[in-house]
Image (spheres, grey):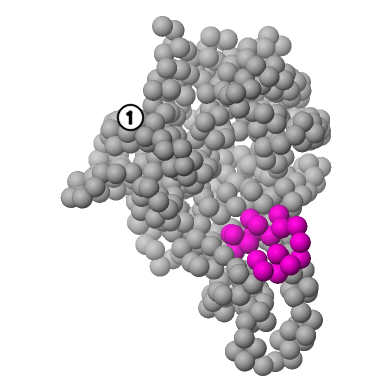
Amino acid sequence: MTDIAAARQSLRDRNLAPEAPLVRQLIADTGLDASARRKISAHAEALVTTVRKGNRLGLMESFLAEYGLATDEGVALMSLAEALLRVPDAETIDALIHDKVGGSNWSSHFGASANQLVNFSSWALSLTADVLGDPEIGPKNALHRAIARLGEPVIRTAVGQAMRLLGSQFVFGRTIDEAIVNAKKPESIGYRYSYDMLGEAARTSADAARYFDAYMSAINSLAPHCTAASVRDNPGISVKLSALHPRYEFAQRSRVMTELVEATRQLALAAKSANMGFNIDAEEADRLDLSLDIIAEVLATPELAGWDGFGVVVQAYGKRVLPLIDWLDATAKSLNRRIMVRLVKGAYWDAEIKRAQVMGLPDYPVYTRKAATDISYIAAARKLFTKASIYPQFASHNAHTAAAVLHLAAEAGRGPDSYEFQRLHGMGERLHDVLRTSAGTRTRIYAPVGAHKDLLAYLVRRLLENGANGSFVYQIADEDIPAATVAEDPIGKVLARDSAPTTSSHLPLEGAGQEGVGERPYV
């Protein structure tokens, strides 16, 4: 059996494998003994302390510190953001606002944040809730009475505009040209960008054609700015396969392998001509096997020879991440190519858990505990540093994860020019500034581009990923949480928990994870 075939078989075997033995193996795969783990945690704690001293947390960190998913108001806001612009009629919008805003205690959040935009949002939501509530309870002032007289149409418009304002903070530009202009200042101090043209799965051929044109237009707009000899020093673009075909599913494999492969190949060839990075984004677990067939077919295109810019995003929360890296390495070697691999924690955890439950699967394709995902990420990072055919890209906002990557890079003799960190626009800014100045690392910023109507699904995924009270982004903003707790070693956490007595070994059957909302396995 070839290395490619062996890795593919191992990948399939691990899809729904039991979690506990996999995590035990992952701990061994990290190669970290107790001494190394202590050093990494100490470094991470120092990073957290430095980040907090900077007093320059981004809007996302400030927002989630006040409205995380551990609060009723945070859940209400997420639901409102997800649903508001999808509702077709005014009557339903009014009912939605009544439901999500009217019954929450917004006034308790006013003035609690260091970010004035967050405080203004709290004030506006509190005022809206007062208007919607019992007039005998609301504030007896002229502003309140005036707004109450104007009625629900004004509230509906104001809340809709507030959601647009919130969303605009997480979009790098409404168009690719606007985003390119916005990137100039960060690029001047060494940051690079990977642009994501916002959009979800295509539902029709017209949708797919529109997304294809958006990607091609973005590549053409970025091409004049790709002036460096190395792909690593130029901007890049991220592409969702599901946006390029309305029937991206195993049942339509013959169509996908013709139509979707050709569309992806055309975009890859255009990216190669511009000498820019071209990343295939990760999506739901049930699409992974089919995506590898597409990737193999496109990567084998003879005209792509000599280009190091083809990239693939892999998700550490997936149980198949290690054999997936082996497969990518073996495939690249067989074609005498070098590729990029962006390692992320994962973006569809809630959907993966619910799908497995609905389908009655024997297990989950993703890890159910945050610490397990963090360990998987470290094991995957170690493996990436052993692959000469792969340029590693580490996407994380977590100080412990960053400290672990730096430790593994030093062990592997890899300098900061042989890999890069990545972060999302609007998140982790201070941490990556510290990494750049203290360790000389390179950071690429993942920048969403598009109108607000295309933002909602992206924004909700970010809130789900980072709004849980166990996430780093949530904890870094809460100075009541000790730096040592924020920088806690995930291996030690798993070993301590698994050594404690338990009454059940069953995986979670309800809700958002084995330990509830605070255990989502993201950043």
| Most common secondary structure along the magenta stretch | helix
Position of the N terminus by quadrant: top left
Is 131 one of the magenta-colored residues? no
x and y percentages locating residue 402 in the rendered image: 45, 43
Image point (71%, 36%), residue name? 203
Relative horizontal placement of residue 142, taking residue 401 as reference (left or right): right
What is the quadrant of residue 104 in the picture?
bottom right
x and y percentages locating residue 264 in the rendered image: 70, 23
Magenta segment = 77-96
Determine whether 129 is above or below 496 in the image: below
Q: Is residue 429 visible?
A: no
Is 87 one of the magenta-colored residues? yes
Q: Is residue 21 visible?
A: yes
Determine whether 430 is above or below 411 in the image: below
x and y percentages locating residue 34 in the rendered image: 25, 40
> Residue 88 or 464: which is nearer the viewer?
88
| Numbered disc 1: secondary structure | helix
Relative horizontal placement of residue 203, taking residue 61 as reference (left or right): right
> Residue 261 or 67: which is nearer the viewer?
261
> Mark 1 is on which residue type?
Asp
Relative horizontal placement of residue 149, taking residue 409 as reference (left or right): right
What is the quadrant of residue 98 in the picture?
bottom right
Determine whether 51 is above or below 10 in the image: below
x and y percentages locating residue 417 in the rendered image: 55, 30
Image point (74%, 67%), residue name? 91
Image point (64%, 48%), residue name? 457
Circle 1 residue: 29
